[in-house]
Amino acid sequence: MLLSYKYRIYPNRTQAAALGEMLADFCQLYNAALEQRIAAYQRRSISLRYKDQSAELKATRAAHDGLARWSYTAEQQVLRKLEKTFAAFFGRIRRGAKPGFPRFRARDRYHAADFRVADGLTIRKSGRLGFVGVPGEIKVRWHRPLPSKPKSAILTRRAGKWYIVFHVEIAAAEQQDGAAIGIDLGLTSLAALSTGELIARPNHTKHAAKKLRRLQRALARCKRGSTVRLKRKAVGAKLHAHIGNSRRDHLHKVSAALVARFGRIAIEDLNIKGLAAGVLAKHVQDASWTQLVSMLDYKAEKAGGQIVKVNPRGTSQTCPECGTVAVKMLAERTHRCDCGCVLDRDVAAAMVIHYRAFGFWPGTGRGTPSQRDAA
């Protein structure tokens, strides 16, 4: 399995300026390649591919002094990124979704570059990084060791800070048996477990909303292109990055704790993209269900656990004791049934998820294969 290991890097002022120039040149290359594809199709009805544009890269580097400073393979990755963008565009057309034709990129929003380790990017014996075209060696904060030698990496910039993300191939652990749990993802609480536990939702965006509004109003009053506007924009970006880091840190801790406790985890196979486009979009985005599910998925695989996704239809309407389906409004947060079952709505749904995934109710044993098939 392929995992990503992210580290903070600390370039000095000269190195940071060089990295910024490199991203700017890569952005220019991306836009030029996109313009070439559009012109070739409009004028001669030719659809250019990565192979065609990559063959011209050497000539392009010779004609453009700025591009010749940087890694050749990193510039190939820029052209591959454009190829992936067009592949996604045509894929959306085939699926009947909104196409979204590839757009030109602004320098201020081009924040990442792909590298091959030992080709354009090297890890020096001193533990520092070297980039082709960037003077000196860049300091890295190795807060955890790499499990094996990486083959590729991504240089990223966010809110004025620089990071390197290494892609490392590791062997997945053998699947192990363990305690089973059903998890219902929610908005009132981040997750409800079939054991009856509730994991609180931190509401990072809500807590920072007042400060965000104040910064956005101050930004709106600034004249476009002014130095003051750039400074206030940087302050807002820094706050957004802090919110994202806090949310990600909490989700890492929650997912790690769940994987450590349970060997088999059942969750709903939700259409999160569709939910994020509805009236509760802001809350769904803040809860970051997609990120949590992704973390559970790769951490369980790494630990030899199992993730089971079940049909979410009716999980919150079904009684976990008698199986009766009773429609409840979203505002009703307590499950009450004529059989006498009274539970938190989300906990009841988690118990139903557990049964659908494993064929037995929490605490009642493993169940027979026929029971699992019936579920």
Image (spheres, grey):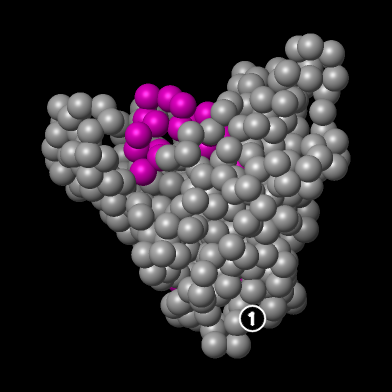
Q: Which residue is mark 1?
A: 147
Residue 29 seen in the current view: yes
Classify residue 242 as left or right of residue 26. left
* Element marked by disc 1: loop
What residue range appears in magenta? 257-286
The percent position of residue 79, horizontal first and vertical second, equals: 72, 42
Residue 362 seen in the current view: no
Residue 285 part of the magenta-drawn span? yes
The percent position of residue 134, horizontal first and vertical second, equals: 54, 65
Residue 179 location, quadrant:
bottom right
Bin the neighbour count of mark 1 within 10 Å (Cα to Cα): few under 14, some 14-19, many 20 and up: few
Q: Residue at x 57, y 45 (%)?
A: 25
- How many numbered discs? 1
Q: Say which quadrant the N terminus sits in.
A: bottom right
Residue 374 part of the magenta-drawn span? no
| Towards the viewer: 66 or 98 | 66
The percent position of residue 216, horizontal first and vertical second, equals: 21, 34
